[in-house]
Amino acid sequence: MITKSSLEESDSFLAQGGICVLKNDQDYDSFFEDTLRAGHYENRRESVDIMIRESRSVIDELIAYGVDFEKENGQLRYTKEAAHSTNRILYHEDVTGKEITTKLLAAVKKCENVTLLERTTMIDILCRNNSCDGILLQNPDGTLKAVFGNHVIWASGGIGGIYANSTNYPHLTGDALALSLRHDIELEHINYVQIHPTTLYSEKKGRRFLISESVRGEGAVLLDKNGKRFTNELLPRDVLTGEIRKQMAKEGSKHVWMNMMTITDMDITKRFPNIYRHCLEEGYDVTKEWIPVVPAQHYFMGGVHVDRYSHTSMRHLYAAGETCCNGVHGRNRLASNSLLESLVFARNAAYRMTEMDTDHDGKRPCRYLPYVDMTLEELKDVYDIVAQTEDLEAFAETNKQLILDEIHRLDSAN
């Protein structure tokens, strides 16, 4: 397992609101409909069904790994977010992603057969005849190394790093998408980019701090410059973003305001401690004043096309999480489906890879064995390596523009 930055710097780690789960059998139809409605009915229904039906077993696994979800009288407590017709979201304070990711990382670190490499970058994949044998990576010292494997899974996050304003970490630059474009790996809906309606407005450069959907779910309201409420805060994200932008254009302002003091049935410093602390650091006390909020790029519904097993159009290459598009989200993601979708389909990929290797009873010939000791120059004669290894910085910048150009092309076509 390699990661481009530190282990903790992933968007999953940043997820605040929570994770959806099917509460009971009676909740299935409304959960399904809520997801489709938010996605403008462009969702892949088979994928939505898989995600919902497997949600409870995923939650049970997380609890077994020590994930501490909020409880009330010994029972799991469910909250509600925008576009949900009922409370079905589990959470840990306002740092649910951090809680889940931290506990899963702790479990991975106990696995003797897993090597974790930080600040290590995927430069290219080792592929031939539409089959993936491994990756070409760059070590922290700048050296390049080929790593081989029976299967490769991309879980490299979204594309926020190619935008000026985003809630994502800046190193998440859609590397898997660029390589897919270069290697003719099928992509799907890569112009389906979600803008989060409420991030903390700042004049500073860098990643935008997200004010979670669940804040509005608990009762916070949006106000114009005169303190007048101008919209329904629980609209789907894309619709609410449009309402905020219209209000900003009407006022000629750079942001609108959020009032969290309307949440009166709980202590917001305890329900949203991370948001409370961060706003204080920026000079805002949410218990006493409004905070300025503005839309920013947040989530990516498109990505590398995968099937129900998270398998891409290239043999032995898988993708999971925000990197891929399995069709769950349609044109617009329903709040708190992201963590659930990532976990369900990553688990399915793991099952599929294991199943494929088991089917061969360990007797399948190692297809890449003749090449493992080759130099990089020799490997270039075997594999379709497209990376400009002599100027990797320029290659990375070209990849960013490659993705933006394709997004703009698709937008223009539509």
Image: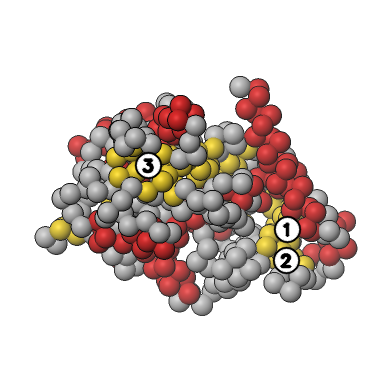
Residue lying at 76% horizontally and 70% vertically, measured from the top left: 142
Split into 4 quadrants, where in the image is the C terminus? top right
Against 126, residue 36 (above or below) is above
Q: Could you give the CA–CA distance between mark 3 and mark 1, rounded to whole angstroms?
A: 42 Å
**Is there CB contact under 8 Å for labels 3 and 1?**
no
The residue under label 2 is: 138
Split into 4 quadrants, where in the image is the N terminus? bottom right
Whichever of callouts 3 and 1 sits on the residue coming sooner in the sequence is 1
**Is there CB contact under 8 Å for labels 1 and 2?**
yes
Against 85, residue 119 (above or below) is below
The tag on residue 123 is 1
- Looking at the rendered structure, the kind of residue marked 1 is Ile
Q: Could you give the CA–CA distance between mark 2 and mark 3, rounded to whole angstroms?
A: 44 Å
The residue under label 3 is: 257
- Looking at the rendered structure, the kind of residue marked 2 is Gln
Q: Is residue 61 left or right of residue 314?
A: left
The tag on residue 318 is none
Residue lying at 63% horizontally and 68% vertically, measured from the top left: 119
- Viewer-side label of 2, 3: 3
Of helix, strand and loop, which one carries label 2? strand
**Crowding at mark 2 (Cα within 10 Å: few <14, some 14-19, many 20+):** many
Residue lying at 73% horizontally and 61% vertically, measured from the top left: 136
Q: Quadrant of residue 235?
A: top left
